[in-house]
Amino acid sequence: STRCRGMLCDLCGLSDAALGSPLLRVPNMLEWYELMPHVTRNRRVFLLADVSGHSVEAAEEPPTKLKAKKDMVAVKIMIGGELFSCADEDHFEGITDGGMMECLPRNEEGCQYELNVRDEANLPFVTGSLSAHQCCAVSAHTARKERVVSEHKAKREVAVEQDAGILCGRTLSLGRDSGGRTYWKFNADKALFVCVSDDTKIWHRYFDAEVIASILHGLGKEPIAVEIKQAFPEAARLLRGRKWSQMLLKRQFSKGSNLQVVAGASKIENNKDTTQEDDQDEPYQAGEEVLVESKCGQMLWDGKVIAVSQKDEKVNGYRVSYKGWSSRFDEWVGPFRVVEPIENNISIQQDMVQELRNHSLTAPDVLKRMIAKKHLNSKDRARNRAKIPEFADVAKVPPSASSGEQAFALAKAALLMIEAALPHGAIDNSPTGAWRPGYAAEWRKAVQKATGPFTVMACAFMLEENIDPEWMDPHAIHLLSSLPQRWKSIREANVSGLCLRIAMLDQGVQYTTVDRLKYASKGRK
């Protein structure tokens, strides 16, 4: 028998008996992307190893049941982190899609029998970490192929547009990374320009090859790295020779950064050495109030110059003391990090502070339509001083993630957002209450670390059960009660059912109703 009792399809959420089709071992998205470059070229990836400890001749009589002659194990070889394969075009003839649909049964006995048959016939096969019906596996494979084709077409459209832009003299961006930053190279300048955000129009300019090589190292295997390497071959050469890090370490401290940040992107100065700027501007004196840029460049701190360092009659550093901080945090900083506290710089400082405060509240555009998102910053929230989860990080998925994985990540962020927006009185958050701070912290951790809809569905029921019915819309309570029972929803949890329940919960909570005294601790009588 190939029956898998108690197991459900990872793609549709149904059992093998529900569709009358056995469950197969199907590759997930990452495994699929790893296998496709090999099988499309008719190369064998999986090898078979006999671990039974006896030869084929030892079996005198043929098996009378569905039983394997040998215990086989599927093996794949990784060399230097890359999958190894061997050419085998003869045995791929007549097999569609390079054998990507030749999956093994999930049932152990059926899998061993299938491995023995394919070993005798020398036929290719694939296996994976997911369990799915044959029809679900075919649908997933077809959808993945269509996605690859559409991505290739989109890349070709961008390449054609860039070539056309070069011919007509119009400058287009080299591309965009996973963080939303765009990269540019203008014909009149040899530097690399990076636009941090399309909304704020903050630009960074890099012109040293070793700095551009460090950017390429940080981008890793992102597609934009290929375009930057083609546009800056010198930086690519330093990256291959691993010389860029040595060149950065040998830089003198007196030399300024080659980075200019301009709000508004109307003009970008071309100062290659901040010592030139020091010649033009009057140096700061000890005791003078200044603003000091943080090392990451995302904050301006209030400080005071307490000492000045000079070399060859030029200022090469300031020792600053930060307001409100102990003297043990005093440090020497380069002149390029010290700016005058004029009105424009103070305004930029305030914008940076506000951006830092809102960082944890950033959320994907899909979640911004939630009712909970509108009340995250409202007063009298039941979370009190608990840190708001970083919804953007929770919802972040790799570029190769499937639509189901993207929806699952968004569902986790949405559930966390609902809990963070609950008002006082909606839930018992007292020190001994059902939703006490320690319990709530563990609940948030469980949601963030969940790897499947089963856990998140259970967490959604836990939150729903602890919300006071007075803070729920009666119509929403009726709709939630019409959904499948809790034991069935958790046992057969899937992404679509999870998203439906979270959306209905968001619509039902009355975020504007506040009662600070409902669960307040009572004093002694």
Image (cartoon, rainbow, N blue to C red):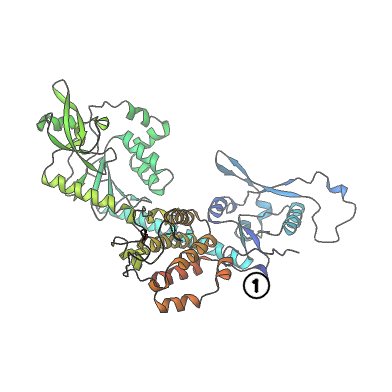
- Label 1 amino acid? Ala
Q: Which residue is mark 1?
A: 18
The residue closer to the viewer here, 262 or 389, is: 389
Q: Which image quarter holds the C terminus? A: bottom left
Using the rendered view, name the quadrant where residue 502 is placed. Answer: bottom left
The residue closer to the viewer here, 398 or 524, is: 524
The residue closer to the viewer here, 326 or 91, is: 326
Q: Position of residue 262 (x, y in %)?
A: 20, 45
Residue 187 seen in this snapshot: yes
Q: Residue furthest top?
A: 312
Residue at x 40% of width, y 45% of height: 226
* Residue 485 vertical placement versus 320 (above, below): below
Q: Residues within 10 Å of mark 1 (few under 14, many from 20)?
A: few
Q: Which image quarter holds the N terminus? A: bottom right
Q: Position of residue 277 (x, y in %)?
A: 14, 33
Q: With 2 as the anchor, is 295 left or right in this view?
A: left
* Residue 161 vertical placement versus 344 (above, below): below
